[in-house]
């Protein structure tokens, strides 16, 4: 009976010690890494952090780049749509389709940035006067230039379109270079990188089509 009682007592002490260890481990977890994780979660989801992530870390150069490049791209798209109707060369038509396909989505992207920053998205250019007002931007065509392009046809149109679009692209590359140097918003500087790469390649292609290289 004595041996049996001793065995029971040892078993009870073992169970009690195990339970105490579990309680201590749980307490340590609450005050250690588990508590730190909860603090991190609360910090990451704070209103200030959320607002900062939504607005993006941007500066005036990002705003100017987005507003001006939207207008610049819109004119390129207008020119590309004219080429789809008036160009005599399939190669020119294909290039125009490529330009429109690349720049339309970029206009939407930049418009979204401006909206998220609380900035106004530029209004559509509605006539020659608007084109003239925007022609101060590098590579932008004047209202007179656009009228001439609209009236041209056949091979004359092809040459005029390519010549104007080379100048237009060179202006876009210059504007993108300013964003690369002065911009702060990562997606905007990345878009500037893409503009430089894509439009530099298209300038080379169009010069080859014009027989200049």
Image (cartoon, grey):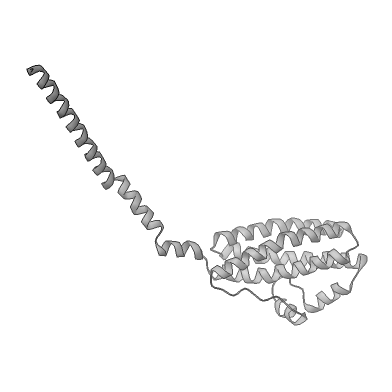
Of residues 44 and 56, the one drawn nearer to the viewer in this rendering: 44
User: Farthest residue toward the right?
Assistant: 154
Where's residue 75, x and y in %?
74, 70
Which corner quadrant of the image does residue 82 belong to?
A: bottom right
Which corner quadrant of the image does residue 1 belong to?
A: top left
Where's residue 151, x and y in %?
88, 74
Work out which quarter of the rendered image holds the C terminus and state it: bottom right
Of residues 205 and 146, the one drawn nearer to the viewer in this rendering: 146
Q: Is residue 120 above or below residue 28?
A: below
Q: Residue at x 66, y 57 (%)?
A: 194
Of residues 160 and 82, the one drawn nearer to the viewer in this rendering: 82
Q: Residue at x 60, y 66 (%)?
A: 112
Residue 164 shown left or right of residue 109 in the figure: right
Where's residue 104, x and y in %?
71, 63
User: Farthest residue toward the front?
Assistant: 1
Q: Residue at x 7, y 18 (%)?
A: 2
Residue 38 shown left or right of residue 163 in the figure: left
* Tally of numbered tags: 0
Where's residue 33, x and y in %?
31, 45
């Amino acid at each position: 009976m004595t041996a049996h009682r001793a065995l029971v007592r040892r078993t009870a002490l073992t169970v009690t010690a195990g339970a105490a260890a579990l309680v201590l481990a749980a307490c340590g977890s609450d005050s250690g890494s588990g508590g730190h994780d909860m603090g991190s979660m609360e910090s990451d989801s704070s209103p200030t952090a959320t607002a900062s992530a939504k607005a993006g870390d941007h500066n005036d150069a990002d705003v100017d780049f987005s507003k001006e490049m939207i207008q610049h791209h819109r004119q390129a798209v207008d020119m590309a749509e004219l080429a789809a109707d008036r160009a005599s060369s399939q190669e020119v038509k294909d290039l125009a389709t490529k330009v429109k396909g690349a720049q339309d989505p970029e206009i939407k992207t930049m418009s979204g940035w401006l909206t998220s920053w609380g900035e106004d998205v530029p209004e559509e250019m509605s006539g020659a006067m608007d084109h003239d007002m925007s022609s101060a931007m590098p590579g932008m065509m004047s209202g007179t230039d656009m009228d001439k392009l609209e009236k041209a046809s056949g091979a004359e149109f092809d040459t005029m379109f390519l010549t104007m679009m080379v100048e237009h692209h060179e202006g876009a590359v210059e504007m993108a270079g300013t964003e690369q140097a002065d911009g702060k918003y990562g997606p905007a500087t990345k878009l500037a990188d893409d503009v430089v790469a894509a439009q530099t390649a298209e300038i080379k292609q169009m010069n080859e089509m014009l027989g200049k290289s």
